[in-house]
Amino acid sequence: MAVDNIHESPRKGKGGLPAYAHNSYSAGYAANKDPRVNGNVGSKMVIDIPPDRHELFLLGEGEKKITFEPETRVPNAAMFTFNKEDHTLGNLLRAKLVKSPHVMFAAYQVPHPLFAVFKLRVQTDGDVSPKEAVVQACRDLVAELQLLDQEFTKEWELKKIAGAGADM
């Protein structure tokens, strides 16, 4: 019997998952219809090919990288949602924020492991706003990573020079 019917799973976000859940695997069933038993006879799973890994981190049209929501239940607190980012940036930001003297609380959460999104919650003492604290933490991280890049490049060049000298 020929495969004549494919039932795809819905591509809308469900259960609080982001609306762009269509970037993940999509599965459905291909079934053979048998009129004698009024239903499917044998079925096989059909899985769409997922996008390339790097495409999961590129923003689509109209997508924002960061959204900001002030917390209404706690003073001087806010929730930041980072789109198309994962634990790497979340943990770096959290670690930098907790070292700040004005930050009372900083934590992040990845709502679902299949989606490159994390939520960062920040509470400050009021001298600095949560937004200012996150911006400063980002600036500090960029400065540290630039220094790391310079040091690595310097050491790499020295290693190449030392290796060339050993060949003589």
Image: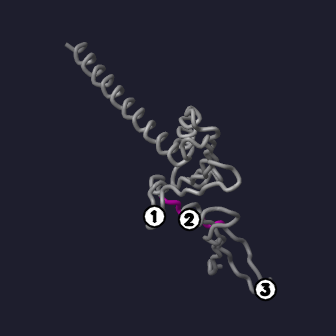
Residue picked out by circle 2: 20
Question: Which of disc 1 and disc 3 is earlier in sequence?
Answer: 3
Q: Residue furthest right?
A: 37
Residue pictured at 27% horizontal, 16% vertical:
162
- Across and down, in percent, residue 77 comes to 63, 49
Going by the numbered disc 2, the residue's amino acid type is Tyr
Question: Which of disc 2 and disc 3 is earlier in sequence?
Answer: 2
Residue 116 lies within the magenta run: no
Residue pictured at 32% horizontal, 25% vertical:
156
Going by the numbered disc 3, the residue's amino acid type is Arg
Q: Quadrant of residue 36?
A: bottom right
- The answer to whether residue 1 is above or below residue 112 is below
Q: Nearer the viewer, residue 104 or 110?
A: 104
Decide: marks 2, 1 in contact (CB < 8 A)? yes
Going by the numbered disc 1, the residue's amino acid type is Gly
Q: Residue furthest bottom?
A: 35
- Across and down, in percent, residue 131 comes to 52, 49
State the separation of the CA atoms marked 3 and 1.
48 Å
* Quadrant of the rendering where the N terminus is positioned: bottom right
**Residue 36: image tag:** 3
In the image: residue 101, left or right of residue 143? right
Q: Nearer the viewer, mark 3 or mark 2?
A: 2
**Residue 60: image tag:** 1
Magenta-tinted stretch: 45-51
Q: Residues within 10 Å of mark 1 (few under 14, many from 20)?
A: few
- The answer to whether residue 104 is above or below residue 15 is above
State the separation of the CA atoms marked 3 and 2.
41 Å
Q: Nearer the viewer, mark 3 or mark 1?
A: 1
Q: Nearer the viewer, residue 141 or 43?
A: 141
**Residue 142: image tag:** none
